[in-house]
Amino acid sequence: MTVTAPKTDAVLLAASDLARSVLEEVAEPGTIGAHLGMDLLEERLGMHWFECTSPGYRGWRWGVSVARVPRAKVATVCETNLLPGPDAVLAPEWLPYADRLAPGDLGAGDVLPFRPDDPNLEAGFEATGEEEVDQMAFFELGLGRPRVLSAEGREAAATRWYSGDNGPTSEVAAKATEHCSTCGYFLPMAGALRVTFGVCANEWSPSDGRVVTLDHGCGAHSETDMDHPEPMPVGEPIVDEFAVDVEPAERPAQRDQDESPTATTDMASDDTTDDTTDGATDEAQDASPGETPAEDQPAEEQHGSDDPVTD
């Protein structure tokens, strides 16, 4: 079957002014640009395109569909549209909530939607109704979950862990001298991933509580050590006896004099002066005119013997 393109319709092609006039009734004023042409969609059905000059719709186009009945010489407007062009700025493709989440987006109180067709999971052991079989599965093998990790899920997790910060290619592992497989703090995992992964239980390690590979390593390995430098000899302490700390001593007499009232000091000074003057006057009157007062005479030199010392 050969598909032939519809012929050009002169009546529809000449209806550009009609399409613009109808578009001005529905479009925002000033957003209708130049006429971009017409596409003949079907026989007697075409679409006139106009440039959209709105700043928020760069690359979009106004479209007005026109049609005519057979042997009619007048076109009729069907509908108007604002459609994106080849260079239009479009919103990103809509994704469901479950597909928009990325690792690390889940916070406190957030709940992931249930995914019945998760490729990383597969059906687990289900109860058979036989008591002995179910007891073996639930209590001794530790099963009973509706779904368990599938082979695809294990492969994805192993690839992510092996190429992560706790794998053999990280900077910490590259500078380590020993691997986690020989460390006493290494706890092997159970199941199929046991041959490659385990959990670090060393609180001094940067990988504490995380899944690590057997060929990972760090500086907190239980069996490694470093060369301790020899202690430097220190001589006997030297006491400097010539260094004296000089501290100003407080003078008690000066402090008492400063604390005593001025009036008391003046009164005491006046009494002492009067008594001294009176006593000196009396002694001067008692002494004879030819005698020198006793206090003015030189004291007699005393010696250890009672015999006077002669010159």
Image (cartoon, helix red, strand yellow):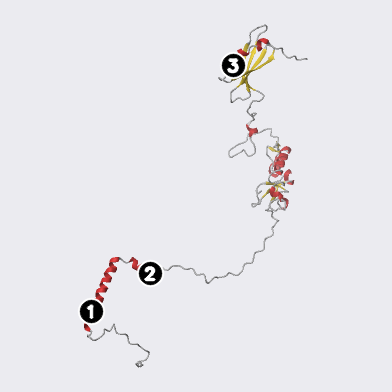
In percent of the image, x 30 and y 66: which residue is there?
Answer: 262
Q: Secondary structure at mark 1?
A: helix
Residue projecting furthest to the front: 290
Quadrant containing the C terminus is bottom left
Pick the front one: 141 or 101: 101
Q: Amino acid at mark 1?
A: Thr
Residue to which mark 2 is pinned = 252
Q: Are marks 2 and 3 in contact (CB under 8 Å)?
A: no
Is residue 90 shown above or below 189? above
Mark 1 vs mark 3, foreground winner is: 1
Q: What separation in Å lies between label 1 and label 3 (alpha carbons)?
A: 139 Å
How crowded is the residue under tag 1: few (<14 C-alpha within 10 Å), some, or many (20+)? few
Q: Earlier in the sequence, mark 1 or mark 3?
A: 3
The label shown at residue 23 is 3
Res 70 quadrant in image: top right
Q: Left or right: 51 with respect to 308?
A: right
- Between disc 1 and disc 2, the foreground one is 1
Residue 240, image quadrant: bottom right
- Please name the residue shown 60% across and 19% down the image: 33
Q: Nearer the viewer, residue 293 or 96?
A: 293
Mark 3, secondary structure of its residue: helix
Is residue 309 toward the left or the right of residue 138 in the image? Answer: left
Q: Amino acid at mark 2?
A: Pro
Is residue 160 visible in the rendered structure shown here? yes
In the picture shown, does residue 278 fall above or below 37? below
Q: Are marks 1 and 3 in contact (CB under 8 Å)?
A: no
Q: Which mark sits nearer the N-terminus, 2 or 3?
A: 3
Q: Residue furthest top?
A: 71
Amino acid type of the residue that numbered disc 3 sits on in the rendered structure: Leu
Horizontal and vertical percent position of residue 189: 70, 46
- Residue 252 at x, y = what percent? 38, 69
Extreme residue toward the right, this view: 1
